[in-house]
Amino acid sequence: MSSKAVRNLGRGAIGLCAALSVYACVATSRTLLAPPTIPGAEFVGSGECADCHVDVTAQFETATHSMLQVQGENARSIGCESCHGAGSLHTESGGESGTIVNPRDSPETCFQCHVDKRGQFALPHSHPLTGGPLELSTGRVSCGDCHEPHRGPAIESGGTALQSINEGCLDCHAAQRGPHVFEHEALREGCTTCHEPHGSPNDKMLTERNSTLCLKCHYQEQVAANEILIGGRNHASFLQRGSCWSAGCHEAVHGSNVNSSLRF
Ligand code: HEC
Ligand code: HEC
Ligand code: HEC
Ligand code: HEC
Ligand code: HEC
Ligand code: HEC
Ligand code: HEC
């Protein structure tokens, strides 16, 4: 599927069109959205998948992406097959391997509609994705590690609880998990207050490259010509040394067991 899919993915308007109105895209019949495909396969509709994948199908109506389903003949190419590609060869073969797209192996299927994410993952600092031009290997992450395609909110453990978004991150990043004797309350706001999970131009995928990251929350007050108060302490001579964490001052940004000012 790759070369054809990649060609189509380059065209930003496709994703937008698909996102805004799947029905319209399909109905105008100039197939603007070409889902990832298995050569020679045709769309069979989600109903066919239910026969063998009972559990996935039963939960699917609660999923964010089940909203993309429309009724009627035009609905055939969406539903399960919007991510898994046309399923006729898979269905006829009784599920033989290599006959259906599995997005775990490649993000291309998601990039089709979420065009902006391709760009974010291409930034200098991002999570290393499975698929892509590099070989499949361990130590890589797929969209499905952080997003649930088949049931409930697509943002895993999502909904309103930021704490549970953190849980997803902490599954892999155990070093950032507390409890710490001196907690940094910023983490309660969520890892994404400071990190952009899809990629960023900044080191460590930070949302800001310098002390602005911290000064969003920590008020900075110029009280005299040579006195800048942050956290009740004069920082005037500290600020020139680098960012709050790189200057050797607050290295334990995720919490500390030894120092209340999060120094180490
Ligand atoms: C006749 C039974 C049958 C039907 C119908 C069927 N599948 Fe499957 N499918 C299987 C079997 C068997 C496997 C391999 C074992 C497994 O992973 O459960 C499989 C595996 C898969 C996989 C994993 C493939 C991989 O390489 O990792 C996906 C994705 C999938 N099916 C999606 C679908 C979709 C979407 C449909 C509807 C278009 C569908 N299946 C219809 C039997 C079926
Ligand atoms: C939003 C895209 C999307 C849609 C829509 C979707 N899937 Fe999936 N599917 C995925 C992803 C992503 C994975 C790989 C999950 C992972 O990384 O573990 C997957 C994996 C699978 C697998 C392999 C077994 C597994 O759980 O890993 C099966 C079977 C499957 N899907 C069936 C279906 C069926 C049936 C439907 C429709 C009811 C459906 N999918 C709709 C994205 C989707
Ligand atoms: C056919 C187009 C299409 C494909 C393919 C697709 N998506 Fe989506 N996705 C959408 C649309 C449209 C929305 C917006 C739904 C909404 O806002 O209610 C969405 C929403 C989302 C959201 C946001 C949910 C939220 O609560 O804000 C996530 C996360 C997401 N998709 C991830 C994925 C992943 C991961 C894949 C690949 C496995 C994928 N999508 C494949 C169209 C698609
Ligand atoms: C390391 C975990 C992680 C990975 C990998 C990941 N995401 Fe996300 N994604 C998130 C989190 C966390 C959010 C919620 C962002 C927030 O709350 O600021 C999100 C939000 C989204 C959203 C909705 C909001 C937005 O930014 O548009 C979409 C769509 C999305 N992701 C698509 C994808 C796709 C497509 C992939 C794979 C190419 C992917 N994500 C891979 C963690 C991840
Ligand atoms: C499925 C496992 C997994 C999940 C879930 C995950 N990550 Fe990662 N993360 C990784 C891997 C693998 C790397 C790359 C590590 C490397 O290059 O050494 C990484 C790298 C990072 C880095 C950069 C580290 C560096 O040294 O540059 C940050 C920051 C990060 N992740 C934050 C997050 C956040 C925030 C979340 C939750 C939204 C999250 N991760 C979820 C696996 C994961
Ligand atoms: C207050 C802002 C902030 C919050 C919130 C935050 N981080 Fe960080 N994180 C940073 C900074 C700053 C760095 C860079 C530290 C450095 O380079 O020494 C960093 C670095 C990292 C790294 C790379 C560690 C390394 O040793 O290279 C990972 C992984 C990471 N953060 C994961 C997380 C996770 C997971 C969460 C949520 C539980 C989180 N962060 C919440 C600011 C934050
Ligand atoms: C989302 C808001 C937020 C962000 C962003 C944030 N902090 Fe905090 N930070 C807090 C809160 C809330 C407290 C606890 C109340 C207080 O002491 O001000 C705290 C406490 C601290 C403390 C302990 C103060 C003391 O001695 O009691 C230090 C040091 C600190 N933060 C440093 C940083 C650094 C360095 C950054 C940037 C990497 C940062 N913070 C980013 C919200 C934030």
Image (spheres, grey):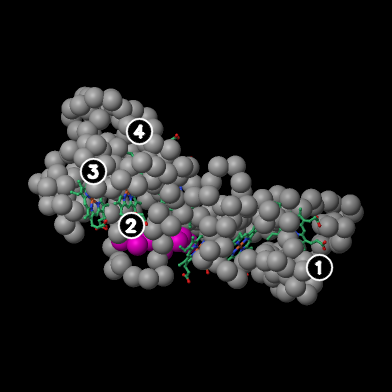
Q: Amino acid at mark 3?
A: Asp
Say whether disc 4 or disc 2 marks the residue closer to the N-terminus.
4
Quadrant the C terminus occupies? bottom right
Q: Are marks 4 and 2 in contact (CB under 8 Å)?
A: no
Q: Specify the label residue 260 is tagged with.
A: 1
Mark 3 CB lies closer than 8 A to ligand 1: yes
Residue furthest right in the image = 224
Give the foreground label among 2 and 1: 2
Q: Nearer the viewer, mark 3 or mark 4?
A: 3
| Towards the viewer: 22 or 147 | 147
Category of crowding for the residue at label 4, using alpha-carbon neighbours closer than 10 angstroms: few (below 14), some (14–19), many (at least 20): some
Badge 2 marks a residue whose secondary structure is loop
Report, in whole angstroms, how far the alpha carbon at label 3 lies from the one at label 4.
21 Å
Q: Please give the range of residues in magenta.
A: 124-132
Q: Position of residue 41 (x, y in %)?
A: 13, 45
Q: Identify the residue position indicated by label 3 in the image.
A: 51
Q: Quadrant of residue 159?
A: top right
Compute the Cα span from label 3 to label 2: 22 Å
Residues at circles 3 and 2 in contact by the CB criterion of under 8 Å: no
Q: Amino acid at mark 1?
A: Ser
Q: Residues within 10 Å of mark 2 (few under 14, many from 20)?
A: some
Few, some or many residues within 10 Å of mark 3 (<14, 14–19, 20+):
few
Q: Residue beneath label 2, please?
A: 104
Is disc 3 in contact with disc 1, using a CB cutoff of under 8 Å? no
Residue for badge 4: 68
Snapshot quadrant of residue 49: top left
Residue 104 visible within the image: yes
Say if disc 1 is inside 8 Å of ligand 7.
yes
How far separated are the C-alphas under marks 4 and 1? 49 Å
Q: Earlier in the sequence, mark 4 or mark 1?
A: 4
Looking at the rendered structure, the kind of residue marked 4 is Leu
